Image (cartoon, rainbow, N blue to C red):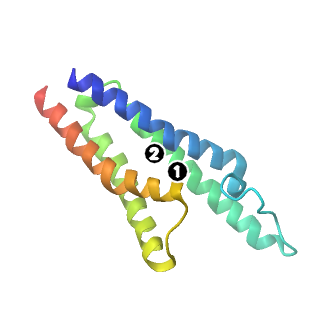
Amino acid sequence: MERRILQVVVALLCLVPLSAGAAGVVLGPGFVFPNLTATADPAPFADLDSHFRYLSGIFLGVGLLFVSTVPTIERSTGRFRLAAALVVVGGLARALSLAQTGAPSAPHLAGLGLELVVTPLLVLWQARVAAKR
């Protein structure tokens, strides 16, 4: 039963990187900043757009990596920990931004909580489920 609950929780949480990653890939920075457009000098905007979509693709990939662990979550420890490590490193980068530039909007603060609190707790939970098999 615990395995099934973990699978459901992870599957539901995968909706965050899958939806945000896909939206970022399709919409670019306009996903977060709807009024952002190319200025008189389009080169910086093109660079920002390119980088934002690249990072969104990575975010989408992390979501897919997590999804791939769901069916056999008790045997997918290595993949699960790799995906979690990527999320935690991203959270540490977000925490650096918080320290250097101040608090972002509420959705980004929620992301920080998911990255630095929820994800490590999921790793511990997955390890517990894996140890029971």
Q: Quadrant of residue 46?
A: bottom right
Q: Quadrant of residue 65?
A: top left
Q: Residue furthest right?
A: 40
Q: Quadrant of residue 86?
A: bottom left
User: Is 32 situated left or right of 86 in this image?
Assistant: right
Query: From the viewer's perspective, is residue 83 above or below residue 93?
Result: above
Residue, x 42% and y 73% (percent of image)?
Answer: 96
Which labelled disc corresponds to residue 25?
none
Q: Nearer the viewer, residue 127 or 77?
A: 127
Instruction: Answer whether labels 1 and 2 touch (C-beta < 8 Å).
Output: yes
Residue, x 15% and y 36% (percent of image)?
Answer: 128
Q: Nearer the viewer, residue 124 or 61?
A: 124
Q: Residue furthest top?
A: 1
Which labelled disc corresponds to residue 58?
1
Task: Give the quarter of the figure containing the N terminus.
Answer: top left
**Residue 32 on image: x %, y %:** 65, 56
**Residue 55 on image: x %, y %:** 56, 56
User: Is 39 situated left or right of 18 in this image?
Assistant: right
Task: Give the quarter of the figure containing the C terminus.
Answer: top left
Residue, x 70% and y 59% (percent of image)?
Answer: 33
User: Is 121 situated left or right of 10 in this image?
Assistant: left
Which labelled disc corresponds to residue 62?
2
**Residue 132 on image: x %, y %:** 11, 28
Residue, x 88% and y 74% (percent of image)?
Answer: 40
**Residue 30 on image: x %, y %:** 72, 55
Query: From the viewer's perspective, is residue 28 above or below residue 20?
Result: below
